[in-house]
Image (cartoon, rainbow, N blue to C red):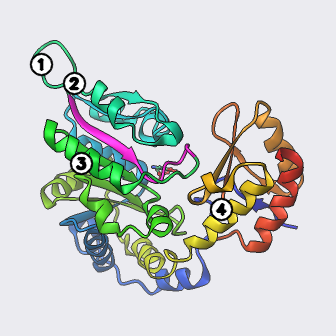
Amino acid sequence: MTSIDLRSDTVTRPTDAMRAAMVSAEVGDDVYGEDPTVLALQERVAGLFGHEAALFTPTGSMANVLGVRALVAPGQEVLCDSSAHIARAELGAHGAFSGITMRTWTGDRGQLDLSMAMRLFAPDMGPFFVPTAAISVENTHNFAGGAVLPIEDLRSLREYADSVGAGVHLDGARIWNAHVATGVPLADYGAIADVLCVCLSKGLGAPVGSLLVGPTEVVTEARVWRKRMGGGMRQAGILAAAGLHALDHHVERLVDDHAHARLLAEAVGVDPTGVDTNIVVVERPDAAAVVAAARVQGVLVATVGPTVVRLVTHLDVTRGDAERAAAVLSRLLG
Ligand SMILES: Cc1ncc(COP(=O)(O)O)c(C=O)c1O
């Protein structure tokens, strides 16, 4: 029996239909701006979020680095949640490549605590303190168990950021899950951010690819930085075709992943009403031992901290898989 892989929604393999779309993609050299499929994807995604332009990147991490650096100059800071992907899981890329610093608040379940962000915000006071140039939010929030940030909170953030002249970066690697879970239009999420990163390679099931979305001016400059970082891709239309296929076929079905996550939550003793989307996090002092025991029984799960086990549902997890995994995990975690 093959294992059921709940480590991440990045483990999906392209479906046959997605592979067929990739095979027949029209391509050109995208560093020359000549790949029609990449251009179509960029235009479509920009339009979905109500922004002027988008840039296809190999990874979400690169889109985040390009997006944050567009708002924050070397020597300035970005504020974010302490368990944000940009703070925890991009290996210090924003400091290493962009010369920026971060200060963080700790929100309950990754939520934006605007009052904490307000307390952290530092205006430019000359040659004394690091000035805050941007505030970053993550929706859905990965390490907070796929939690959705309510649109009202994001709108309040936008208002506050405007009032102090700060930028807003949205890490929307899983914005599709937030959109499907809440019914909030993608353009409403786009409207609260100056720049956003969205991923095709997570819940949407594409093998590779993310996009930076924002104003034309920002995307034009990000294109130069993408190349500088070694992220200029040539006949990338093969990958963009997978993304276009995913947008056509894999967005609405995320409701299934969310239902499967709630089923797993119930099995492991987590309140399913607190599971907004496709990720369940379980606090366990013996997290590594749980991962090892589950593996022996054909269920792959991950630790995302010494005491946190994470279960993620996705395109390659059927209802039957979820039920089988629930039976195994309820014995280990329930
Ligand atoms: C919230 C979030 N942002 C960004 C990324 C980075 O994406 P990538 O792995 O494509 O660099 C991830 C990856 O899991 C993520 O969960």
Amino acid at pointer 2? Ala
Q: Which residues are magenta?
A: 132-144
Name which residue lies at 85% across and 52% down.
330
Task: Residue 122: give its label.
Answer: 2
SS type, badge 4: loop
Amino acid at pointer 4? Thr
Q: Position of residue 292 (x, y in %)?
A: 83, 42
Tell which circle, 3 or 4, labels the residue nearer the N-terminal end.
3
Residues at marks 2 and 4, CA–CA distance in whole angstroms: 39 Å
SS type, badge 3: helix
Residues at marks 1 and 4, CA–CA distance in whole angstroms: 46 Å
Farthest residue to the top: give it. 128
| Dot 1 and dot 4 residues touching (CB under 8 Å) | no
138 is within the stretch colored magenta: yes
| Dot 1 and dot 2 residues touching (CB under 8 Å) | yes
Q: Is residue 274 left or right of residue 37?
A: right
Residue for badge 1: 125
Residue for badge 4: 313
| Dot 2 and dot 4 residues touching (CB under 8 Å) | no
Q: Is residue 26 above or below residue 90?
A: below
Tell which circle, 2 or 3, labels the residue nearer the N-terminal end.
2
Residues at marks 2 and 3, CA–CA distance in whole angstroms: 17 Å
Q: Position of residue 205 (x, y in %)?
A: 55, 69
